[in-house]
Image (spheres, grey):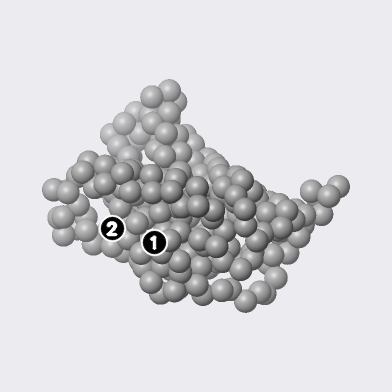
Amino acid sequence: MLYINRFFTAIELIYSPKPILDYVVLDLNSIHLSEIWQAVHWLYWPVLLFALYKAPWRIMLQKDSSNILFATCASIFLLWQLKINVADGLSVHLLGMTVLTLMFRWQVALIAQAIILVGITLVSRADFQAFAMNGLLSGVVPVAISYAIWRFNEWYLPANYFVYIFIAAFLAAALSMLFTGYLSYRVLSSTINQLSTQTLDEYLLIYIPMMYPEAFLTGAVISIFVIYKPHWISTFDDRRYLNRR
């Protein structure tokens, strides 16, 4: 019964008008991270450097590809401005990482997320000490989950347009949001910080209703692009998914 009450409290946090703090990034501020996490979060940088090394720069530096990438980054940057304030230095927003992964694959998705995170950090006066941890939780984790689910869809599921949309887009986006929330919760609950147990529980429960808009938005965007601009989706092969119908 207690968790049901906290679930509805999380719903009220989403739909009630509350002032949003302008100095937080995705979710975490360094005031909530102990020294051990300040060291662990630097694991983000080798992953980002590997993505920079593996990225298809010859394709991405073409005019059309770069324009599409920058427009997508700008759209997600604006999406991240719609945040739910949970506590001082702690907020939640939609991710959009599954869209980036399906459009550009994991290497470019991680680079784009880093660019977006830099912009959010600068305009929001956010904490640069928590940059890498936010990069891990809001970038590496959802991108890895989205890419793994897309690979599973490619290898084991029928080559069907609707399977691609519902599995690689809807399901991947929902699970990315849920796992990101759970890992953020575990990070915060395993460190010494100023957050109460009730605040942490509400923070975790917020991700359950937020799965649905994340999944719907991702599925809608990918569906529209697949129909009208299939060449924008690097993970979608129209010869494989459409010509076999």
User: Residue farthest to the front?
Assistant: 35
| Tag 2 residue | 69
Q: Where 131 falls versus 176 (above or below)?
A: below
Q: Could you tell me the amino acid type at mark 1? A: Leu
Residue 242 in view here: yes
Q: Residue at x 57, y 58 (%)?
A: 32
User: Residue farthest to the top?
Assistant: 156
Q: Which mark is residue 184?
A: none
Q: Is residue 229 left or right of residue 205?
A: left
Q: Please provide percent x and percent y for residue 105.
A: 32, 43
Q: Which mark is residue 117?
A: 1
Q: Where 126 falls versus 196 (above or below)?
A: below
Q: Could you tell me the amino acid type at mark 2? A: Leu
Chain-order first, disc 1 or disc 2: 2
Closer-to-camera residue (72/185): 185
Closer-to-camera residue (191/225): 191
